Amino acid sequence: MDYGQLENQPRSNNLVGENSSLSDVSAIQDYGIIGDCRAAALVSRHGSIDWLCWPRFDKASIFAALLDPERGGYWSISADSAQQIERQYLPESNVLQTKFSTSSSAATLTDLMPVIDESSTPLSMIADHEIIREVECTAGEIVIDFSFVPRAEYGLNSVHIRDAGKLGFRMEVGGGVYWLRSSVPLQLRGDAAYARISMKHGDSLRFSFSYAEEAPTVLPPLDKTIIAARVRATVEWWQQWAKRAQYDGPYRDEVVRSALALKLLSYAPSGAIIAAPTTSLPERIGSDLNWDYRYCWLRDASLTIRAMLGLGYWEEADDFMDWMLHATRVTQPELRVAYTVYGELAPRERVLDLAGYKGSRPVRIGNAARDQFQLDVYGEVIDAAAQYVFHGRELDRVMQKILIGFGNYVVKHWMLPDEGIWEPRTGREHHTHSRLLCWTALDRLISLHQQGMLSLLGTAQLDVYKQNSELIRREIQQRGWNQQLQSYVSVLDGDQLDASLLLLSWYGFEKAGSPRMQTTHRAIMESLATDGLLYRYRRDLPEGAFAICSFWEAEYLALGGGSLAQAHTLFRRLLTYRNELGLYGEEIDPRTGAALGNFPQGFTHVGLIGAALSIAEREKGEPQLAHREETATKRSSQEGAPA
Amino acid sequence: MNWESWLLSGLLATLALSTVLSLSQGIGLTRMNIPYLLGTMVTPDRQRAKLYGFVIHIVNGWLFSILYVWIFESQRLATWWFGMLIGLAQALFVLTVGMTLMPSFHPRMASEQHGPNASRQLEPPGFMALNYGFRTPVSVFIAHAAYGAILGAFYQLR
């Protein structure tokens, strides 16, 4: 290998410095994600890590070129001369490979955050937080450019890099320390490190970037065999996890990839699940629809657990139920919208002085939705708990009391206006979807009681639940229905539609094949469909199509709103909007197919899994999950609770 | 030597030392974690290392207080300020000599001369343990000053 002399070392794609511009940041769908269920990094198709927050998802970044190519910081390993770039995850893992090719040469970059089975006894020490990057020249000769430009606090502070000799490069930030280790010499210039390395077939480069703030860090050795063993161990860990997915339908690869993406959004130490690992990726390029999603929305997390349960991931469900118990303890029976991974209220929203993704400002951290009132959350949480039971798990007394507390809260508050599922900042209204989920909350509690799984619920209280459930049902049927439009509507007595109305069938309120749902579906298509996708609602300046809404439609069709063939057709078309790694953002630009919003988005992957499960159930002629409580319970009691 | 008094004051001083060091770590003053450093001498497992290290540290601190008591007896002086002076001297020794030598006797610590390898990966403390944060010496001085002061204040000369 030759280590060339560097003059000014610009980034080949995501430039930082005098040659950079806003357009240099990659398209959202051009990113891949690596993670260790504690934190995640976004890697561009050009080999640049443009987003990383350590030690956990919602901490300040060390690389944030995604939000400001000039100031954010990045870590790029790329082949300037590459004529072709291909990416893939190693099979059924979250280990990312990027292949750079020219006409006569090729190199493969492998990126991962190592993971190990915590129950196993480690034979050697393990860094708290680490990224391993390995480059192998697989053909001919190729030049690799290395640029390491860390910036603390979302790019607002520079980072002093100290050369610690054979230990590597050391960067102290606040109370923590970052270490960069390299198998080749790097040139320090200012607050950055660079190299240009000429590789020939068989050569390899290895890098480790780690972080510690609670104790002296572990400095991993970079011997080729050790790195190979660590990569292998991580791949095997993911593959073992993926193998547990209980899905035997026609979309196994896609379902497993979505499950792997969701797993990356879980925070292993607490069991929480965040909505997305990024902040302020815009819902419309250049707009101000930029939000911080690095927190745990009870709604999203509940839906995620439902998907995980559908795939047989019991441990994740157990962890989430434990987390929910802990996280909501302070506010019970009231639930907040978003929490941190440790159950604190999501921080107040503030704006950072960054350029924003392709100029989309402001860049926000924290989330103002924390102060919103969203009644649907109760239904989501209780439904997740019900699904948990329907899959053979049990509710202990504490859990029962908490659920009854939520039920009592719903009884007292269901008639109030709220901000609703789409979290508009325009005030409260009487949302049909919120009413639906209040009905769901009481319906599931009644159902649990009837099955003997909610023994602490007294008869008098049960009657109250039944009365209120009926009142809500009547109100939705009367005031949530617009006779003129022949459709359910977003707001009681209103005339606007939104895609969440498709969920009336999923929650068992109205059969998918009923005349009302058929005409509602038709009205939604007329009002919200665009190029085969669905907007969540109509607005004057349209954002992207909301990806999960189209999966809801596929699921609606699978539940009986259409034919199986229609569900398959729609599902397959939606698969074409994934990036080549199988990842989705929150929204899709209907004109270009580009991803919009925070990335990757758990909600969308939940939608994919839910639709795939419903299609598979329809194929097998099984009743849909929410309607088969008795069947599920009987089956579980025969088979015993899953281990 | 007053054994009963040593047992009590030695335990109190050791607990105070551990508390101050843990507090320093908790508030981000330093990443130095003595139980972790001691525990990793016997196991690579992080959680077990912290537990084993805590026990080793308590026993070690307790036994080490004999040296303080011996100085108190030999000088016939046991006061908080005299104990604190000894503590500050010990802290200086630990930071300059002890920390520098640690990679030589810690079986899992990397050295700045050779870098990490498969069996030695733990970040070395460096001079004055500054690798663990530039405020580390402050916490070490405060902790040992408290250790010595408590010993001096509570130990009853024979």
Image: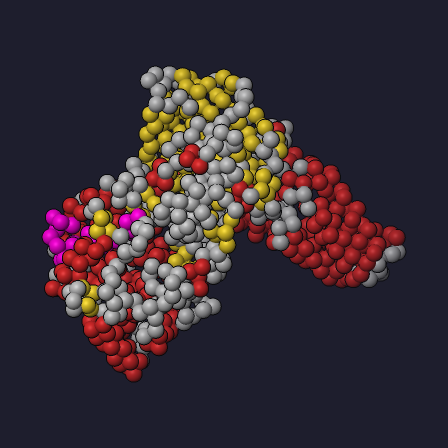
| Span shown in magenta | A544-567
Q: Is residue A566 magenta?
A: yes
- Give residue A63's position: percent from left, percent from top: 49, 40
Q: Residue at x 75, y 60 (%)?
A: B9
Q: Is residue A505 magenta?
A: no
Q: Residue at x 34, y 28 (%)?
A: A85
- Give residue A510's position: percent from left, percent from top: 18, 66
> Along the line of sight, which residue is nearer the eye, A638 or A502?
A502
Q: Residue at x 33, y 18 (%)?
A: A103
> Along the line of sight, which residue is nearer the eye, A361 or A506?
A361
> Along the line of sight, which residue is nearer the eye, A233 or A63?
A63
Q: Residue at x 76, y 62 (%)?
A: B4
Examine the image and state in which quarter residue A390 appears: bottom left
Q: Is residue A457 left or right of residue A176?
A: left
Q: Is residue A630 above or below residue A22?
A: below
- Give residue A557's position: percent from left, percent from top: 16, 54
> Along the line of sight, which residue is nearer the eye, A344 or A207?
A344
